[in-house]
Amino acid sequence: MIRFLTQVGLYFQFLKKVFSKPEKASVYYRQTMTEFVSLGLTSVGIISIVSFFMGAVITLQTAYNTENPIYPTYLIGLGCRDSIILEFSSTVAALILAGKVGSNIAGEIGTMRTEQIDALEIMGINSASYLVLPKIIATLLFNPILTLISISIGIFGGWAAGTLSGVVTSENFIYGIQYAFIPYYITYSLIKTLFFAFIITSVSSFQGYYVNGGSLEVGRSSTKAVVYSSVLILMFNVILTQLLLS
Amino acid sequence: MIRVKNLDKAFYGKSVLTDISVEFEPGITTLIIGQSGSGKTVLLKSIVGLYDIDKGEIWYEDTLFNKLAFADKKKIRSEIGMLFQGSALFDSLTVEQNVRFPLDMFTEKSPEEKSDRLNFCLKRVNIINANSLFPSELSGGMKKRVAIARAISLNPKYLFCDEPNSGLDPVTAIVIDELIRELTEEYSMTTIVNTHDMNSVMEIGEKIVFISEGRKCWEGDKNEVLNSDCKPLNDFVFANSLAKKIKADAG
């Protein structure tokens, strides 16, 4: 318990260091643009692929589990839309990003721990801020875009699977995704995405920054980054759902 | 000039450095020698402020460095260049970007001026046509030279080198030693080199401080180091069979 509380305290001290005034805004801006590419743009592919197939599966599952003449088939489109907007594109995509981006961040910062972070400190640079703040800003800006991409491709995947398999007509699916649409669900999804982006980046950076030891420890820190981020994402999913939808 | 007075440092209650007092003068390369685990690196990292010391004083000219807050240390740190054992080049940056990094961070120079300065530094350490290479594409000796170029890019007053020759062949090691000595004289820097390489001691040891079990045991120059009556120093200097044989032959 004491160890846990120590880690929590250390995490908040770390955040304080991260959010201190940057040494030179232009350098941080350039670094943020780099992270935009390495953490954001490179995730578009995996998110698109996973979203497409998840949308497809959700459509087929909904169709086969609601096979009843009483239910209109446009409900398949509605079910696909709401599942993707409310849960998949924010929470499940965040879990995927925790695996991809989280391990990447922890590994990158962990390998810098030996001497490169010392080199930054000796130059008088706040290493935590320089290494982590651009990552946090980049993911906070880019992950909502990823979520919107995921929603679009997921619904497209659902339409493709539904129409190609013949479980729903194109007209009914499109009618379903427009039926009883609540725009606030998009806002809800994006708010969750922002929280999850912060969790993934800060927790993974924290794990990498305080690595003690060699390659074995760096590997462990990457694993911890993914596990802790995923657990926190699921925990905050419950809290945010209660706060935002109740 | 850097002055260290009565420095103590312990980790988890275990003393690593005890009552170290030493002065480092400008224009002179001072070597801190001692066995692995004797406390050399801890002393170096304490002097540059990477470790907080438990007792004592570290003076940079007339400024008591160890009592300054992080923000106040920045000015002095901008005058420090450091060469790490593993070079500490940023893997994701090219040679050019590595050397440009301190210039981007701490100067308001134009891009052309920065390019001139970084090319001058790279040329000074004999790195030619390697600007676009990444650290993983460089040999050990080249990495050290690029790290030296980065360390001198801001024209530092103080240069710290932690085991600059580790992992290098004797010929390349001499090149690095000579480069450090030349730069020290050229820019009148206060240079501190941590090493356990006796070749370095004999090449550039204008002033030598011997550390054993966390204490300063001896201080002198390269001409005195072979004739000292300090037993731990003799055990260190004449540790290998070749050195023992030379000593025996010399009577």
Image (tube, coloured by chain):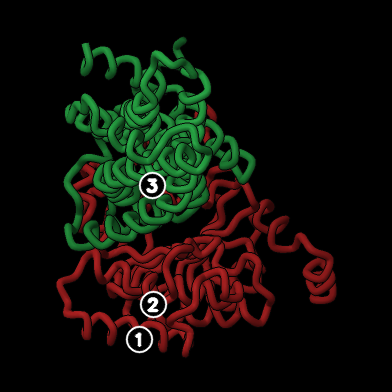
Chain colours: A green, B red
Packing grade of label 3 (10 A; few <14, some 14-19, many >=20) is some
Residue sitting nearer the eye, B223 or B199: B199
Q: Which residue is mark 1?
A: B119
Q: Position of residue A55 (x, y in %)?
A: 44, 36
Amino acid carrying mark 1 in the image: Asn
Left or right: B41 as drawn, with respect to A239: right
Amino acid carrying mark 3 in the image: Leu
Left or right: B76 as drawn, with respect to A108: left
Tag count in the figure? 3
Specify the label residue B96 is tagged with. 2
**Which numbered disc flags the more N-terminal residue, 3 or 1?**
3
Amino acid carrying mark 2 in the image: Glu
CA separation, marks 1 and 2? 8 Å
Task: Classify mark 2: helix, strand or loop.
Answer: helix
Residue plotted at (26% across, 35% down): A194
Q: Position of residue A196 (x, y in %)?
A: 33, 32
Which quadrant of the figure contains the N terminus of chain B? bottom left
Task: Tell me, yes or no, whether dots 3 and 1 are on the same chain.
Answer: yes
Which quadrant of the figure contains the C terminus of chain B? bottom right
Task: Tell me, yes or no, whether dots 1 and 2 are on the same chain.
Answer: yes
User: Looking at the picture, does residue A156 appear above or below residue A79?
Assistant: below
Determine the image quadrant of residue B8: top left
Q: Nearer the viewer, mark 2 or mark 3?
A: 2
Q: Position of residue A166 (x, y in %)?
A: 50, 37
Residue plotted at (45% across, 41% down): A163
Tag 1 subunit: B
Residue projecting furthest to the front: A69
Q: Which residue is mark 3?
A: B50
Residue B52: tell me if it is visible.
Answer: no
Tell me, yes or no, whether the two marked residues, 2 and 3, touch with CB atoms within 8 Å.
no
Left or right: A241 as drawn, with respect to A182: right
